[in-house]
Image (cartoon, helix red, strand yellow):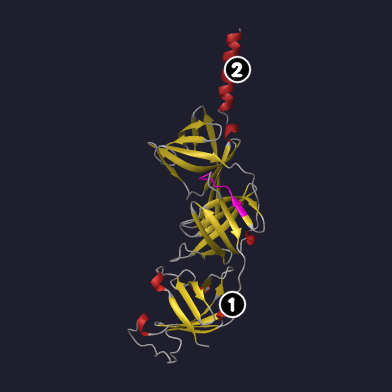
Amino acid sequence: MRSGLLYLLCFLFIISCNTPERLDGLWFIAYSKDKGEKADFRGARNLLHFHGSEVHTIQAGDFAANKLNRISIDTSKYQLNDTILNLWGENISCRITSDSIVLSQFLGIEGMVILLPLKHQGFEVEHNFFKDSWSFQYFGFEDTLDFINDSLFIHTGDLNVYLPTESWSTFEYNGITFLLFNSGILPWMAPITKCTEDTILFENIYRPKQNIALFKVESVSRHNQLIGTWRQGHPDDDRQPPPPSPGMTEADRPIKMTFGPDSVTLTKWDGEETLKWDLTSDGKRIYFIDKIKEKWGSGKIVRLTDDHLFLRMSGNSMEEDTLKLFRVQ
């Protein structure tokens, strides 16, 4: 009698451990393992939300089209039968541990794919909170960035000096605000766990032991110091630059920048153009919003005095490419 009761209890325990309720929650694809090799998914942007007999698949952003605010949510049914997860019409080998879901041959990936739950309580942050300059620490990198508008940020430190402008966005799901970066350095998706006026903390869903944090950088106003005309060459050389001619190269004509309060006239070898200009909040980088992702779309200020302006323009990452300008008036 006792033996029969014991078998019955064991059977009920096994069944209860494999009911859909055990999957309930919000999960992300953390890493894969194949033949002892581990690969994390820092570029992943998908979430799986199991609820009852349904699973919601959340895809954050269309990175190929650079549309980070394009969020898609698909809902489908699933079944869990012992160690087989029937999902999207496929039977997937599934093992559930106390803090993970281990899937085999999932999404065409060789080996095992490990899903981990979001562990921290969500934190909601308004999209317009993200502005000004912040320093960050992530994956061994330290740098500063500036949210220049509601879809672009620009690196102001020593990383990504060649093409410093990248895209960002936010989305909210299940009471959690996620910050999205279309970046080669920062994670593509980071859930916010804490936010104050000067600190933003994220759950590092790919490397839990490595923190992700943004720290507010003090604003520096240098606009007035830049107003005026600056020209490449020697400060005592008052000769006017020659008019443009066919075949003129960068070395043939001195570069000149005339800064007004909100526009700059840029004269160089390929002609003259007037652009809107602004400074990052930390005062480290000049940018021209009309051509922000092009070569010469921004310039990191290497040196600024009353008479000298040294800029490392985007598209020129080498120190010897620094543009050296002197104040004319």
Q: Which mark is residue 223?
A: 1
Tell me: residue 96, above or below residue 199: above
Nearer the observer: mark 1 or 2; the answer is: 1
Residue drawn at the location 52% of the way across and 57% of the way down? 181
Label 1: few (<14), some (14–19) or many (≥20) C-alpha neighbours in 10 Å: some
Q: Is residue 24 left or right of residue 310?
A: right
Residue 126 in picture, x, y percent from top left: 65, 57
Q: Which stretch appears magenta?
A: 200-208
Give the residue pinned by disc 2: 9
Is residue 204 located in the magenta-colored stretch of the structure?
yes
Q: Main secondary structure of the magenta part?
A: loop
Q: Is residue 69 visible?
A: no
Q: Nearer the viewer, residue 196 or 180?
A: 196
Q: Which mark is residue 179?
A: none
Q: Type of residue at label 1? A: His
Residue 92 in picture, x, y percent from top left: 46, 34
Secondary element at image label 1 = helix
Query: Which quadrant of the structure image shows residue 134?
Result: bottom right
Looking at this rendering, what residue extends furthest in the top direction? 1
Q: CA distance from mark 1 to mark 2?
A: 75 Å
Looking at this rendering, what residue extends furthest in the bottom direction? 239
Label 2: few (<14), some (14–19) or many (≥20) C-alpha neighbours in 10 Å: few
Residue 130 in picture, x, y percent from top left: 61, 61
Query: Which quadrant of the structure image shows residue 75?
Result: top right
Residue drawn at the location 53% of the way across and 58% of the way down? 68
Q: How many numbered marks does the figure carry?
A: 2
Residue 207 in picture, x, y percent from top left: 51, 45
Residue drawn at the location 64% of the way across and 58% of the way down? 198
Secondary element at image label 2 = helix
Q: Type of residue at label 2? A: Leu
Nearest to N terminus: mark 1 or mark 2: 2
Is residue 248 located in the magenta-colored stretch of the structure?
no
